Image (cartoon, helix red, strand yellow):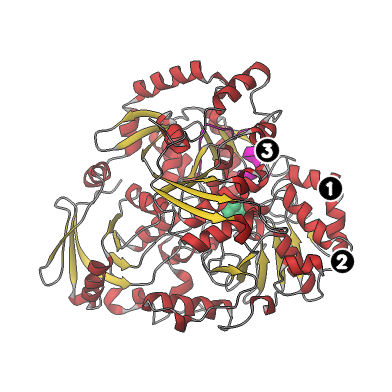
Amino acid sequence: MAKTLYDKLWQSHIVEQQDDGNCLIYIDRQIIHEVTSPQAFEGLRAAGRKLAHPDAMLAVPDHNVPTSADRATAVNAKDSQIQLDTLAENCAEFGVNYIPMLDARQGIVHIVGPEQGFTQPGMTIVCGDSHTSTHGAFGALAFGIGTSEVEHVMATQTLVLKRQKNMRIDVDGVVAAGITAKDIALAIIGEIGTAGGTGYVIEFTGSAIRDLSMEGRMTLCNMSIEAGARSGLVAPDQVTYDYVMGRPQAPKGAAFEQAVAYWNTLVTDDGSLYDKEIYLKAEDIAPQVTWGTSPENVLPITGVVPNPDDVRDAERKIAMQRALDYMGLDAGTKLQDVTIERVFIGSCTNGRIEDFRAVAEVVKGKRVHANVVAWAVPGSGLVKLQAEEEGLDQVLIDAGFDWREPGCSMCLAMNADKLGPHERCASTSNRNFEGRQGPKGRTHLMSPAMAAAAALTGHLTDIRSFEHG
Amino acid sequence: MDKFTKLSAVAAPLPMPNIDTDMIIPQKHLKTIKRTGLGKFSFSNIRYHDDGSEREDFVLNQTAYRNAEILVTGENFGCGSSREHAPWALKDFGIKCIIAPSFADIFYGNCFKNGILPIILPQAVIDLLLDDASRGANAIITVDLERQEISGPDGGKISFEVDPYRRHCLLNGLDDIGLTLEKKDVIQDFEAKKRLSQPWLFKD
Ligand code: SF4
């Protein structure tokens, strides 16, 4: 019978099918960070249990690390420091491969995994972090889990799971100039909503997806969780293999060939049935920007702030008004007239080398607007090094950007990096929830090029008109 | 893990849709290495004023609902992060059961692991329960997991669905790691086969 990519990944990891429809699923890899692992280690210790496969794990601190130049000596909040120290101690005690903060390879878990070749096609990959969906870009079944499940994987290398349904989102055609994976992701969320993918694994197909680089595919799969789907998938192809080959933890030589032969089977068979299919035309996708406090509050940059009076459902009307109040926006305002004070380039969505190239291209030889404070936070130390080799750091610094050390930073404001109350930010991250980037902070999600353009003009800006004028 | 069998308690109405994990527990309170003690921070952005005083308009601050153990809420509850801090905070606050038209997947699973029962019911039924809940301390709702049945304050019965495995674990307070470890042999067999077919995956 014809099978989807998800069906193949699922079936090849079933250890045992239980009578009640749940399955015991084998987990190939687990990545851990300092925020969601301490309680799992604590649980193991309390029960006197060991790690099933320390080798199948990788640990790196990211959420809490300082991103200032003096990070080695920077005074970190005491509770942040406790989490960082606890991760180091737990990894030493349990024998987990741990990349410390001052290591050049340190960075955001979802950037480090792929960079190290830890992420490979065909695997099941978990992490106590919802954006684990990122790794689905390699044709791996990757999803975020809670800390109890982190502990379950640590102790057993398995999880008890129920099969999800298959959804296909097909984006065919060629995107217009200036349109990126981020715009595709936001357009999809605008189309299906933040709960549209709940219960599904989304496979992204179509020529516009095939045309994306690995970085772009990661951006897209990263945002699947924002559409409600725990996992996104892109079938592996030559682009994937070229990215994986030669990475420190990737198979080498004959083993790589053997792996590729297997990876080539990881495609959806012709004639497979999906439970739901969505079609988008690449040509129709305009640069996207969010106006509210949920990623589904998204519109093309040419739009205007919507009016709650146009909404019929009472609860939705209240939610929309609440979002507008929080964001300090009036219905009918042109999105391009919204002024910003902060810019954040970074996060596991858009903190990769391509993203900094895109920003550098926009800001080269120009100056950040006088009213704007702009930050660029590489997703990992290796991204930072690469950008510096290419001279991108200097382009950004000359334009007035603050070029910082790697970490999650202002994506979720767990460390000193945060928006002040009512500060408005053009952000390349993935969530615009209330308080996400700092209490009362206001987040507009968009692509790196769009955020760069906003940094220069001081207001939300259509990258298309910007580039041509 | 704590058992969940039958609960009779005050239900608080919180009809807002899309209550996300950052709203349930703001990220500044995630810097703990323990599972307990987060209750005082739950919903803090909507529960307190900037000066730390309580907001009267927040339902769980109202006298009738201070001891609520059941939340009746809107669709897509718990969307956002995978962090288990959200159910830990709710549990520490005293919430044992959440009833909504839909939940975010990860949050839904996390509830069961922490002895919280999430129940999905159609919006029309939720509307009735919200109505019951709006009567505050006068409206005790009983949730019986054994019989998969909710009894309203006026004696009306509503049945609900729940995954049998999760129900079993919750009813008996079972630690599912222990249950899985009983299957060690099957897991090892699986692994041995995998080592042969995909040797590049194994480093040890
Ligand atoms: S960058 Fe943001 S979304 Fe990504 S792992 Fe860090 S906090 Fe989570």
Can residue B180 be seen at all in this image of the molecule?
A: yes
Q: Which mark is residue A366?
A: 2
Residue A310 as seen in the image, left or right of residue B182: right
Residue A296 x, y percent position in the rendering: 51, 65
Q: Single out the residue that lies furthest toward the left.
A: B155
* Discs 2/3, front: 2
Look at mark 3 in the image and give the residue it sits on: A115
Q: Chain of mark 1?
A: A
Q: CA distance from mark 3 to mark 1?
A: 17 Å
Residue A42 x, y percent position in the rendering: 46, 41
Q: CA distance from mark 2 to mark 1?
A: 19 Å
Q: Chain of mark 2?
A: A
Residue A77 as seen in the image, left or right of residue A103: left
Q: Which residues are magenta?
A: A107-127
Q: CA distance from mark 2 to mark 3?
A: 31 Å
First in sequence: mark 2 vs mark 1: 2
